[in-house]
Image (cartoon, rainbow, N blue to C red):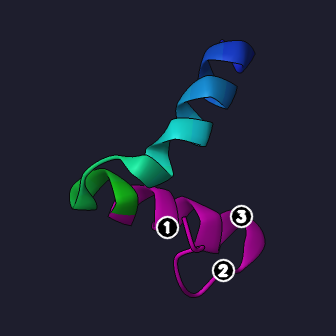
Amino acid sequence: NYIHWRVISQLLPYTNDKANYIYLKYMKYKFGLTKRLPR
């Protein structure tokens, strides 16, 4: 499960806007980010 999460979490920034929004919410919760990282 850990390895799967690591792979998926690395790919999420490159998916569609809905998935990107979910990823941003997670990163904001975990690390306090307020905007998307540059690709």
The segment highlighted magenta reads 21-39
**CA neighbours of label 1 inside 10 A, class few (<14), some (14 to 19), many (20+):** many
Q: Nearer the viewer, residue 15 or 25?
A: 15
Residues at discs 1 and 2 in contact (Cβ within 8 Å): yes
Residue 32 part of the magenta-drawn span = yes
Picture residue at 46% right of the left edge, 45% below the top: 12
* Label 1 to label 2: alpha-carbon separation: 8 Å
Q: Secondary structure at mark 1?
A: helix
Residues at discs 1 and 3 in contact (Cβ within 8 Å): no
Residue 30 part of the magenta-drawn span = yes
Picture residue at 53% right of the left edge, 30% below the top: 8
Q: Secondary structure at mark 3?
A: helix
> Where is mark 2, residue-wise?
33
Residue 22 at x, y percent in the picture:
39, 58
Mark number displayed over residue 24: 1
**CA neighbours of label 2 inside 10 A, class few (<14), some (14 to 19), many (20+):** few
* Label 2 to label 3: alpha-carbon separation: 8 Å
* Label 1 to label 3: alpha-carbon separation: 10 Å
Picture residue at 62% right of the left edge, 25% below the top: 7
